[in-house]
Image (cartoon, helix red, strand yellow):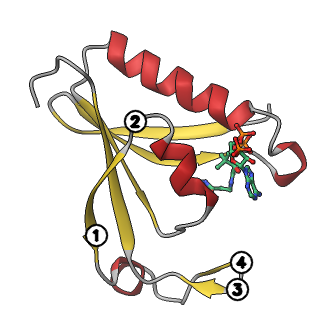
Amino acid sequence: MVGVCVVQPLRAGVYELMSIAVPPSHQKFGYGTALLRWIIDFFRKSGARQIEVGTGTFGYQLAFYQRHGFRVTGIDRDFFIRNYPEPIFEDGIQLFDMLRLTLRYPGSGT
Ligand SMILES: CC(C)(COP(=O)(O)OP(=O)(O)OC[C@H]1O[C@@H](n2cnc3c(N)ncnc32)[C@H](O)[C@@H]1OP(=O)(O)O)[C@@H](O)C(=O)NCCC(=O)NCCS
């Protein structure tokens, strides 16, 4: 296994990609892109209207999602302060705000 993802339903026709990860030893080989494509196709075929994702890391992950059609739809300010008891750091940067991105399926009427 070289990748995992967690998707949960939010409301009718709307799903949230809660987590997607490939271990560092296997990153940059295209597995993450293949998995994200699979998720997008799977939920399109299931009749979903949109997929949302939230990220506190505004690095390469942003391009990873934007390349597949995700657009910025909001900022949840201080999300990581309000929801976690301890500070979280990624690449030495403390996470504060969650950027919300949404992929709307063409023709879904939203
Ligand atoms: C995001 C993630 C799932 C992508 O998986 P992957 O198998 O590396 O994806 P790909 O090989 O398809 O690469 C996708 C892009 O991400 C870039 N990338 C992947 N890992 C990277 C890293 N550690 N540092 C910088 N860029 C990275 C790749 O270079 C590629 O960009 P490019 O097409 O411009 O070259 C994986 O990097 C990961 O698990 N990261 C840590 C967890 C995480 O951040 N999850 C998302 C939370 S919002």
- Residue 97 in percent (x, y) is at 38, 78
- Residue 104 in percent (x, y) is at 26, 32
Q: Earlier in the sequence, mark 4 or mark 1?
A: 1
Mark 3 → mark 1, Cα distance in angstroms: 21 Å
Q: Is residue 27 above or below residue 100?
A: above
Q: Are marks 3 and 4 in contact (CB under 8 Å)?
A: yes
Mark 4 → mark 1, Cα distance in angstroms: 21 Å
Q: Which residue is the site of mark 2?
A: 69
Residue ID at (80%, 43%): 28
- Nearer to us of marks 2 and 4 is 2
Mark 3 → mark 2, Cα distance in angstroms: 28 Å
**Farthest-out residue, top:** 45
Q: Which residue is the site of mark 1?
A: 75
Which amino acid is tagged 4? Asp
Q: In which quadrant of the rendered view does residue 84 lie?
A: bottom left
Image quarter in which the N terminus is found: top right
Residue 91, label in figure? 4
> Which SS class for mark 3?
loop
Q: Is residue 53 above or below residue 87?
A: above
